[in-house]
Image (spheres, coloured by chain):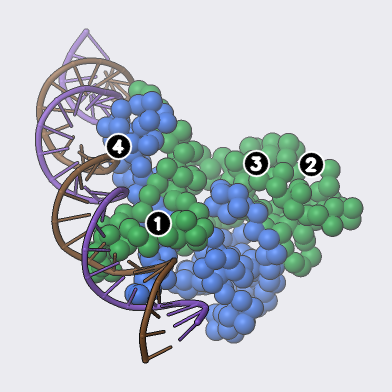
Chain colours: A blue, B green, C brown, D purple
Amino acid sequence: MKNIRKELIELMKSGYCAPRIVEIAKKLKEPSTTIHYNIKQMEKGGEIVGYRAVLDHKKIEEGFCTYVLISLSPDEYTDPERIAKELSKYPQIEDIDVITGGWEMIIKVRSKDIDEYYQFVKNVLSKKGIAKTTSLNSLKEVKSNYVTL
Amino acid sequence: MKNIRKELIELMKSGYCAPRIVEIAKKLKEPSTTIHYNIKQMEKGGEIVGYRAVLDHKKIEEGFCTYVLISLSPDEYTDPERIAKELSKYPQIEDIDVITGGWEMIIKVRSKDIDEYYQFVKNVLSKKGIAKTTSLNSLKEVKSNYVTL
DNA sequence: TTTAAAACTTGAATAATATTCAAATATCAT
DNA sequence: ATGATATTTGAATATTATTCAAGTTTTAAA
């Protein structure tokens, strides 16, 4: 056995997928060439950024999901995007938003378990510029990526 | 013109997409039938829930993104999933998690603008059982769905 | 260690789908 | 109104997914 499934999942997490033009055409009762044309236009226009698989993270060793509210140190207030972009390279992070309210940033992190998450906190969230973090751990994922689980 | 693009987007938000088996096979340098077999197995096993388009919400009239921290009233503590499941039917909500910490639930909501969001708050977040909400508005989406924007 | 069942891999053939093309139609800007 | 640009569409072609059957590996139990 080759155990390529981890690699498969990594690839399909953010690409290597495509729209099903014929199925959409049937659903909307339009010619498939019309659907094709419109989708290509939306890709060119940037409305559609890509295509990906929706995964059940409990089943792929990523069952530990945390939302982290992040407070930056005062000297970073002027450019929260700098730290946000630095964080974006970590594959464990699914979402990053700069926000209003009592914190400057929120991120969504996926790890195998609390031990792996602790490693992530030590390695990534200890960066200078990050003053304080509040971890909100997911007890039950009810809806993810518009899909009710 | 038919303006089917809204419908296209709604369909592709949570389905009507598929993996690109030949591309994956080339990338991993494996026969496409092997990739096909393994992906089908992961679909049957539930690791892969579906396939969807990743969208630039700023460009599709959904530029207003809010994370809402939700406190439930004490009599709902025993079953936070009941309200979570009720909320899951609203198409504006991308994610719902029951969480630990100072709140019982977090949701991610997409709307056109603050007016539309206000309608959502009035219509949806006024449900009995929800005691208090804290809205964290996204000022800048840096990473979404594992894709850096 | 042997053995049989189950799971996985793979190439060849086929079925299904995406893409290209060209012509017709509709929309837009002036 | 009018020319330019964008969209729709069917037919032809190119590409890709799927099925199938045979071989191989892994697993579990004696």
Hey, what amino acid is under mark 2? Ser
Name the residue beneath numbered marker 2: B126
**Do marks 2 and 4 both belong to one polypeptide chain?**
no
**Do marks 2 and 1 both belong to one polypeptide chain?**
yes
Q: Nearer the viewer, mark 3 or mark 2?
A: 3
Q: Nearer the viewer, mark 1 or mark 4?
A: 1
Hey, what amino acid is under mark 1? Lys
Q: Earlier in the sequence, mark 3 or mark 2?
A: 3
Q: Earlier in the sequence, mark 3 or mark 1?
A: 1
Q: Secondary structure at mark 2?
A: loop
Name the residue beneath numbered marker 1: B40
Please give the label number shown on residue B89.
3
CA gap, disc 2 to disc 4?
41 Å
Q: Nearer the viewer, mark 2 or mark 1?
A: 1
Name the residue beneath numbered marker 4: A36
x and y percent of residue A41 in the render? 31, 39
Would you identify the image quadrant in which residue A141 lies?
bottom right
x and y percent of residue D26 in the render? 39, 78
